[in-house]
Image: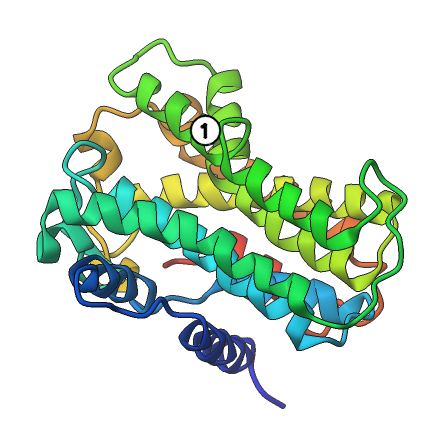
């Protein structure tokens, strides 16, 4: 029986193949920015967000690759753009990402900024290709009945000012702020990190045919996973290994960021990661087949050392 690592690597390779199908193509005058976009997108990684999207989609009865794959590629493009911008000199000023030089180091800050912009816009061009699929989807019982339209709304909203961008804003505002509260940090974690995990899992459920009750439950589980994931990231920034992480440790302290760990201490942070993990798993465990890969993946994400 394949291990979790082997299965995750196999699923990540499947995502890699999907991404290569949807890469932007160069023309005469845009070749440098497109090259920078593709350099960033193909930098490797576990591809957690599209893997989660497809797994939830599969477990809840989805079976059309033409429906789900454009959204899988889109979520990874949005995630990648956020990393490209996070690494910029004006943000975290990191030189390494996933074990190799960051986009701004290779292409310069200006072109890296454009590469991030390009990936964000191209993500929506890509997601819209799901609408070309001939498969008929049942009506959704939420505010928008068309499942593809509602999935696109979730993709846009969770990435925007009421999601990831809002969290990034609060994160920047918290730099050097010694009086940052736990409420502010939770807001940052729920939006900067959890929102895109929520988007991934919710879209998988929506496109598979889940009802609004199930989608809302999955959103809550994903939020807990995301907050725990980010607290664990804060922990690893203190006790992690740079070679395993593929990026420098200690960047939070260097950038004078108040983190969950600096506010609550290492031991309580570890306890809260465990509590949130258990609560998320309790929500997801009644999905048939979730114990085979989804739940072990969640446990690994939250307890990972890289």
Instruction: Residue 294: tell me if it is visible.
Output: no
Percent x, y of residue 90: 17, 31
Instruction: Residue 277: tell me if it is visible.
Output: yes
Q: Nearer the viewer, residue 199 or 31?
A: 31
Residue plotted at (57% across, 49% down): 197
- Image quadrant of residue 46? bottom left
Residue 264, above or below 252? above
Residue plotted at (76% across, 76% down): 63
Element at label 1: helix
In the rendered image, the residue lying farthest to the front is 28
Relative horizontal placement of residue 19, taking residue 224 as reference (left or right): left
Residue plotted at (85% across, 44% down): 212
Relative horizontal placement of residue 120, taking residue 137 as reference (left or right): left
Which residue is tagged 1? 167
Percent x, y of residue 137: 83, 63
The C terminus - image quarter: bottom left
Q: Nearer the viewer, residue 169 or 117?
A: 117
What crowding class fits label 1: few (fewer than 14 Cα within 10 Å), some (14-19), or many (20 or more)?
many
The N terminus - image quarter: bottom right
């Amino acid at each position: 029986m394949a291990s979790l690592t082997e299965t995750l690597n196999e699923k990540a390779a499947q995502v890699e193949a999907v991404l290569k199908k949807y890469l932007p193509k160069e023309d005469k005058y845009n070749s440098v920015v497109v090259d920078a976009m593709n350099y960033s997108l193909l930098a490797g990684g576990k591809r957690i967000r599209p893997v989660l999207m497809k797994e939830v989609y599969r477990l809840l009865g989805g079976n059309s690759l033409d429906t789900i794959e454009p959204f899988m590629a889109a979520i990874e493009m949005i995630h990648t753009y956020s990393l490209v911008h996070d690494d910029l000199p004006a943000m975290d000023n990191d030189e390494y990402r996933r074990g190799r030089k960051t986009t701004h180091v290779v292409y310069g800050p200006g072109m890296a900024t454009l590469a991030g912009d390009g990936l964000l816009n191209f993500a929506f061009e890509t997601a819209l290709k799901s609408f070309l699929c001939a498969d008929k989807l049942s009506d959704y019982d939420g505010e928008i009945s068309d499942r593809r339209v509602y999935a696109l709304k979730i993709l846009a909203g969770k990435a925007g000012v009421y999601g990831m961008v809002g969290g990034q804003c609060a994160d920047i505002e918290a730099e050097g702020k010694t009086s940052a509260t736990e409420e502010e940090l939770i807001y940052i974690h729920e939006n900067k990190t959890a929102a895109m995990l929520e988007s991934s899992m919710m879209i998988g459920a929506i496109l598979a045919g889940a009802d609004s009750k199930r989608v809302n439950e999955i959103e809550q589980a994903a939020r807990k996973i995301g907050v725990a994931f980010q607290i664990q990231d804060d922990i690893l920034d203190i006790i992690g290994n740079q070679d395993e992480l593929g990026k420098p440790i200690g960047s939070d302290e260097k950038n004078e960021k108040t983190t969950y760990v600096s506010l609550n201490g290492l031991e309580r942070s570890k306890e809260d990661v465990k509590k949130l993990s258990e609560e998320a798993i309790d929500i997801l465990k009644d999905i048939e087949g979730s114990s085979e890969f989804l739940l072990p993946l969640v446990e690994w994400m939250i307890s990972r050392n890289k």
